[in-house]
Image (spheres, helix red, strand yellow):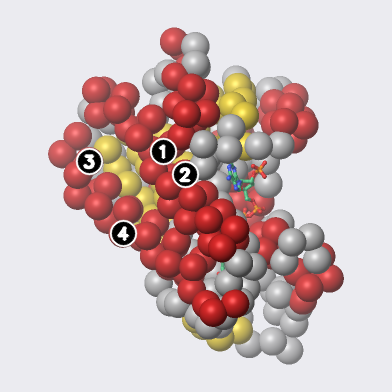
């Protein structure tokens, strides 16, 4: 059976690695993001392995989310797997110094955006009484760290939403998996530090961080589990990472 997966944040990092992994499994892919050139490039590359369509929207724009997902052709409307991955941290500063625009990006993107996309997809899953939602949370959603209050809060919200979704959707045959990665080397830190790639690179110095494919592997594990098994919650850390801010560097 061909399965159809919608991945948000497919243009980079974890989302992109998941798109690669799903393409190898010949899942039909609905790849989402804001960078059109990257979506086109992905469609060309992965289109050699599987059917791929792309949707260009900012998850913070509810109308754009709904319009894009509702505009999918009928044969793409049956979404079996939703990977709620789009998100980022913006800034790293004490609460009294926080930039409100950064806060808005994190709360609107990581929380509201996840909700908007979920709302647009869940209705069909409930009607079909089947589906699987993967929410990408973070170790930051489980352990708040200094200077990261708002990002951590946004990911704590994802944790709560995963639990809440599971409570409401299990009776409709929909699985919900929460995945909480530690430090993964992607564009994440470059975005957090507003393009300061030197500062971003320092985050991953002195230890071997996770790679995006490590998280994609976990997502594949969750979606390929037998029908009677739900992988509810996975925390995945680099071997040198003991907790959110405890990393052994050599
Ligand atoms: P990247 O910066 O590499 O990728 C982020 C992706 O999210 C991009 O594809 C980006 O696409 C998309 N995105 C961000 N904001 C929006 C938005 N407003 N609307 C639509 N798409 C958006 O980071 P990661 O791959 O590392 O991050 C993926 C997820 O993993 C995030 O939710 C992050 O919080 C989480 N995470 C990351 C960890 C890490 O250490 N890297 C650890 C734990 C969790 P585009 O710009 O094209 O829109
Ligand atoms: C990303 C991991 O620890 O930088 O969510 O917040 S962390």
Residue placed most toward the observer, 21 or 114: 114
Query: Which of the image's four quarters has the N terminus?
Result: top left
Considering only order in the chain, which callout, 1 or 4, is on the residue closer to the N terminus? Answer: 1
Residue carrying label 4: 160
Left or right, 59 with respect to 141, comes to right
Question: Disc 3 on helix, strand or loop?
Answer: helix
Disc 4 from disc 3: Cα separation: 14 Å
Considering only order in the chain, which callout, 1 or 3, is on the residue closer to the N terminus? Answer: 1
Number of the label disc, if any, that sits on residue 246: none
Residue placed most toward the observer, 34 or 47: 34
Q: Residues within 10 Å of mark 3 (few under 14, many from 20)?
A: many
Relative image position of residue 29 (x, y in whole percent) = 56, 28
Residue carrying label 2: 113
Considering only order in the chain, which callout, 2 or 4, is on the residue closer to the N terminus? Answer: 2
Residue carrying label 1: 116
Note whether residue 216 is visible. Answer: no
Toward the top, the furthest residue is: 74
Q: Which quadrant of the figure has residue 66?
A: top left
Q: Are marks 3 and 1 in contact (CB under 8 Å)?
A: no
Disc 4 from disc 2: Cα separation: 15 Å
Relative image position of residue 119 (x, y in whole percent) = 35, 35
What residue sits 44% from the left and 19% below the top? 70
Residue placed most toward the observer, 146 or 161: 146
Question: Disc 1 on helix, strand or loop?
Answer: helix
Considering only order in the chain, which callout, 3 or 2, is on the residue closer to the N terminus? Answer: 2
Toward the right, the furthest residue is: 198
Residue carrying label 3: 169
Ligand 2 image-quadrant field: bottom right
């Amino acid at each position: 059976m061909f399965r159809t997966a919608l991945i948000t944040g497919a243009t980079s990092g974890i989302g992109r690695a998941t798109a690669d992994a799903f393409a190898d499994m010949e899942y039909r892919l609905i790849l989402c993001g804001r960078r059109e050139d990257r979506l086109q490039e992905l469609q060309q590359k992965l289109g050699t392995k599987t059917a791929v369509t792309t949707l260009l929207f900012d998850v913070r724009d509810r109308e754009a989310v709904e319009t894009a997902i509702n505009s999918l052709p009928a044969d793409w409307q049956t979404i079996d797997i939703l990977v709620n991955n789009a998100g980022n941290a913006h800034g790293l500063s004490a609460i009294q110094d926080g930039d409100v625009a950064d806060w808005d990006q994190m709360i609107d993107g990581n929380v509201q955006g996840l909700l908007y996309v979920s709302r647009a997809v869940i209705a069909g899953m409930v009607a079909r009484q089947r589906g699987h939602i993967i929410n990408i949370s973070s170790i930051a959603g489980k352990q708040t760290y200094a200077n990261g209050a708002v990002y951590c809060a946004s990911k704590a919200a994802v944790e709560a939403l995963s639990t809440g979704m599971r409570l409401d959707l299990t009776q409709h045959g929909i699985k919900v998996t929460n995945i909480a990665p530690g430090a993964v080397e992607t564009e994440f830190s470059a975005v957090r530090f507003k393009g300061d790639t030197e500062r971003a690179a320092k985050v991953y110095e002195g230890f071997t961080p996770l790679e995006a494919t490590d998280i994609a592997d976990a997502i594949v594990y969750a979606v390929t589990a037998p029908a009677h098994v739900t992988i509810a919650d996975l925390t995945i850390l680099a071997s040198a990472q003991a907790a959110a801010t405890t990393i052994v560097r050599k």
